[in-house]
C-alpha cells in the first residue's frame, strides 16, 4: 500500500471534483454524528488557495487545506482522514506538507484544532498559541484550542 501526497490544485480537474465531493461528504457526515469537524462544501474545497491530498492506492486517504490567508497568516484546517486511514500518520504528513507550502510563500500557519485533530498538528510541530500571537480577525467561529506553527 503506497501513500502519496499531491498538491490539490495540481490534480486533474476530474479528480479535484471527485475528491472535493468525497471531502465534503466526509465533513458533513462527521459533523452530523459527533460534531468533530466543521462541514465544508465542495465549492469551498475547490476554492482553497493551498490544499494537499493523500492518496493510498489511488483512493483518498486524507486532505488538509488553507482556509484563510491574511496579514501574513494562513489558517490551516479541514483536516480529513477517513476512518480506514486513521492511525497511519497520514494526518501528520498532510499537516506538515501544507505547512511547508504556507511557510514557503512567507505565511505564518495557524490552526484551531478540535480534540481529534490536535495530535496531528502537534506531531507536525504546532504548539499552543500564546495570547496575541494571532491577529484578532483570526479568532472567528469555532476557535477552540488555537495552535500556531513556530517560525524557526
Image (cartoon, helix red, strand yellow):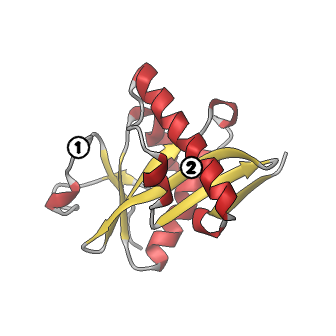
Farthest top residue in view:
33
Give the labeled residue for mark 1: 141
- Whether residue 21 sits left or right of residue 59 in the image: it is left
> Front-most of 122 and 117?
117
Give the labeled residue for mark 2: 20
Mark nearer the N terminus (1 vs 2): 2
> Front-most of 7 and 119?
7
Picture quarter with the N terminus: top right
Q: How many residues crowd mark 2 within 10 Å: few (<14), some (14–19), many (20+)? A: many
Is 96 situated above or below 128?
A: below
Farthest bottom residue in view:
105
Is 72 situated above or below 130?
A: below
Is 31 situated above or below 4?
A: above
Which residue: 27% across, 39% down? 144
- Whether residue 146 sits left or right of residue 66 in the image: it is left
Which residue: 53% across, 61% down? 51
Horizontal and vertical percent position of residue 29: 50, 27
Q: Is residue 36 visible?
A: yes
Amino acid at each position: 500500500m503506497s501513500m502519496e501526497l499531491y498538491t490539490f490544485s495540481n490534480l486533474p480537474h476530474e479528480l479535484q471534483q471527485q475528491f472535493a465531493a468525497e471531502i465534503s461528504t466526509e465533513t458533513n457526515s462527521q459533523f452530523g454524528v459527533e460534531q468533530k469537524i466543521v462541514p465544508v462544501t465542495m465549492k469551498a474545497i475547490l476554492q482553497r488557495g493551498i490544499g494537499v491530498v493523500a492518496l493510498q492506492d489511488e483512493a483518498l486517504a486524507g486532505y488538509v487545506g488553507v482556509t484563510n490567508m491574511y496579514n501574513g497568516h494562513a489558517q490551516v484546517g479541514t483536516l480529513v482522514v477517513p476512518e480506514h486511514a486513521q492511525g497511519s500518520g497520514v494526518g501528520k504528513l498532510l499537516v506538515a506538507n501544507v505547512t511547508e507550502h504556507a511557510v514557503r510563500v512567507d505565511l505564518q500557519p495557524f490552526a484551531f484544532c478540535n480534540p481529534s485533530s490536535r495530535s496531528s498538528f502537534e506531531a507536525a510541530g504546532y504548539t499552543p498559541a500564546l495570547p496575541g500571537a494571532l491577529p484578532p480577525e483570526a479568532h472567528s467561529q469555532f476557535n477552540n484550542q488555537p495552535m500556531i506553527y513556530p517560525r524557526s
